[in-house]
Amino acid sequence: MTIRRTKTPSYRPQRNIQLNWEDFGGGWNSLFKPTELKANELAEATNLMLIGRGTPTGRWGSDTYFLAGSGNVRLLDAYYKSTTSVNELLAITDLGYLVKKSGASYQIITGASFPSGYDFDSVEIGYNTYIAANTQAFIKFDGTNLIPYTGLTPPTGVTATMLSFASGFNTYSWIVDATSQTGRTLGSTAKSLASLPFDLTTTAIKINWTAPSSAPSVLTGFNIYRGTPGNETWIATVGSDTTEYIDKGTPSSDVIFPANSNETAGIKAKYILKFQDRIVLAGIDGDPSKVAISARYPYQDRFTAIDGGGYTYVSPNDGDFITGLGIANLQTTHPLIVVYKQNSTHVISLSTVALGNFVILDPQVYPLTNSAGASNGKTVVQVENDMFSFGRKGLYTTGQEAQFLNQIRTNEISARIRPYVRNLSDKDFKEANAVYIDYKYILSFPSK
């Protein structure tokens, strides 16, 4: 056995690393251990926030601006009227009233009340603020009072009479609905005729109905739908002063069907968006994939085809529902409506199509991504030229692709806080709120 003499190596400690903590421009990084961070990264900041090049400063405090009522604040918005230099701060709390700031307290705005415990959303167009919720019909604030929309009942007594002797082996049916400023009633009971030719341009059918009783200012017209029984689509609109239409085989729409709910008292919708001079509604009660688009100003509260409004469905019956609205390509000549679902993001472009004597709105829907969406519409915020949204996969931005004028994309910008996102509860995602202020996108979780 060979015996070897070994010498114990002398201990040489590693050289100390000197770091200068001048700023935290690298931002918050929760992916690594604190000992693995770079010199300009931050792992924990209690009651601190970063400004400029990551300079820590104390987090904002709070002060009571005015007492808006009891319970939680469900809506906070401003009302502006430049012609009279009127600026009002509006709020809805669990008290159940729309109020405006009056000194340190509030003044109740009359005309309607609201159920407590629900969130509301609003936009202002044409010196009117429109308030939406899926528990309350769409309602208007004109600067003085709340003005609800008056509902209508569907037309009754629909008849169909053949005016020619052409015959065949086909059965068609007709439905009539009434329209107000904000939308349509449910359709009437369908009236069918058998032994008709396939090509209805060879015949003429007279449709009559009985109008609902209403004030002249409420009823704006009637829509007529025709098709095989159960598949009726829109063919024409007539004014409120007539209860008759002669169908000579007018081309029918492929996309406008009778309404699934009575919209004449205002559409119940959870999300509202001002898109150029239109109003867009989504999260509609009983129609989770429907997006309603209004006519252009000054008819921004009208959603009927004859006024220039319309609707479309975003990936209907896919097991998901709409969670928010936004705008993409804001600075271009072709902006798009962005529709967020929980697990996907879609865009809508607006175009028109000629149908008989009418030019109707024809929204086109395109999927943007099927891998990320928004868990809560209150996290969807315009940040400069992009939309930020927060969902179960993190924080994403939606906007123009660099160097491509009309191409948009989604990118994750929350890679460094994935561990934090993974530890959020389902309640946190549903309650999340965001705002863009002082060049910061601020995301908060009330229960945390």
Image (cartoon, rainbow, N blue to C red):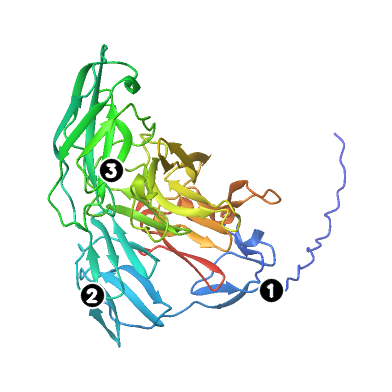
According to the picture, the residue beneath numbered tag 3 turns out to be: 238
Sequence order check: which comes first, mark 2 or mark 3? 2
What quarter of the picture does the N terminus occupy? top right
Residue 38's disc is none
Q: CA distance from mark 2 to mark 1?
A: 54 Å
Q: Are marks 2 and 3 in contact (CB under 8 Å)?
A: no
Depth check: 108 or 357 in front? Answer: 357
Q: Answer with left or right where residue 27 lies relative to residue 380.
A: right
Q: Is residue 330 positioned above or below 212 on the image? A: below
The residue positioned 24% from the left and 81% from the top of the image is: 107
Residue 354 place in picture, x, y as percent: 45, 38
Q: Given the current orientation, which residue lies at the most extreme bottom position? A: 103
Q: Position of residue 236 (x, y in %)?
A: 32, 37
Q: Residue furthest front?
A: 164
* N-term mark: 1 or 3: 1
Residue at x 86% of width, y 49% of height: 6
3 up-or-down from 45: above or below: above
Where on the picture, by quarter, is residue 97? bottom left
Q: Tag 1: Cα neighbours inside 10 Å, few (<14), some, or many (≥20)? A: few
The tag on residue 109 is 2
Classify 124 as above or below 364: below
Q: Nearer the viewer, mark 2 or mark 3?
A: 3
**Circle nearer the viewer, 1 or 3:** 3
Q: Residue at x 48, y 50 (%)?
A: 337
Q: Position of residue 227 (x, y in %)?
A: 29, 26
Instruction: Where is residue 204? Give x, y as percent.
Output: 27, 25
- Where is mark 1, residue-wise? 21
Helix, strand or loop status at disc 2: loop
Q: Is residue 143 left or right of residue 51?
A: left
Element type where label 3 sits in the image: strand
